[in-house]
Image (cartoon, rainbow, N blue to C red):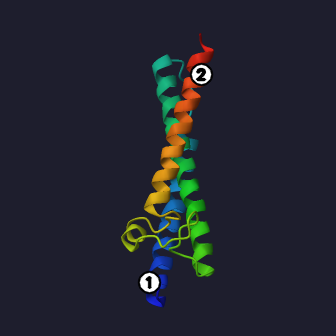
Amino acid sequence: MNAKQVNLARKRLATESEKLIRSIHRNRAAAEEITTENTEDEGDLATISHNKELLYNLHESDFARLRFIGEVIKALDRGQYGKCVHCGNDINERRLLAVPWAALCIRCQEETEMSDISSRLVLAGEDEQTDF
């Protein structure tokens, strides 16, 4: 990557990082506003529980992406931005434009996702077998 591409990537990553930090703060504030005071209605309690879980999942997702961005910025500083951390091949430039925090090339990303799906299927199969 040339210096202009590196600077553009750094700016995009910094912008995304700032967005995530604002989102994390908004989610935290929203979670604090959800209270169970003055309600004993099971429907309201279920809705409150669901909303808290949703906010928690959004919060965790934002934190995970923020960690990815941090790792990619470190790779950028080392001059390794755009290299797949698994196979070492170049990550397609269009992929980096779409997902600037990508650390895997498409092939390795697909392999990782397939492996994750296979692992979940195996675990689900084990759970079903233990029920019998």
Left or right, 31 with respect to 43, comes to right
Q: Is residue 1 above or below residue 54?
A: below
Q: Quadrant of residue 67?
A: bottom right
**Residue 52 drawn above or below residue 64:** above
* Disc number placed over residue 45 in the picture, else none: none
Residue 5: assigned label: 1
Single out the residue that lies furthest toward the bottom.
3
Disc 2 on helix, strand or loop?
helix
As rendered, which of 115 and 46 lies closer to the eye?
A: 115
Residue visible at 51% across and 63% down in the picture = 104
101 and 27: which one is in front? 101
Which is nearer the N-term, disc 2 or disc 1? Answer: 1
Q: Estimate the x, y position of residue 35 in percent, counting from the top left.
A: 56, 34
Report whether residue 52 is seen.
no
Question: What residue is disc 2 on?
Answer: 127
Question: Residue 31: percent from the left, percent from the top?
Answer: 55, 42
How many tags in the picture? 2
Which residue is outermost to the top?
132
Residue 1 image offset from top left, x and y in percent: 47, 84
Local crowd at mark 2 within 10 Å, few (<14), some, or many (≥20)?
few
| Most foreground residue, 123 or 47 | 123
Q: Amino acid at mark 2?
A: Asp
Q: Residue at x 59, y 22 (%)?
A: 127
Which one is in front, 113 or 77?
113
Element type where label 1 sits in the image: helix
Quadrant of the frame with the C terminus: top right
The type of residue carrying mark 1 is: Gln
| Residue in the image at 49% along x and 24% along y | 46
Disc 1: CA contacts within 10 A as few (<14), some (14-19) or many (>=20): few
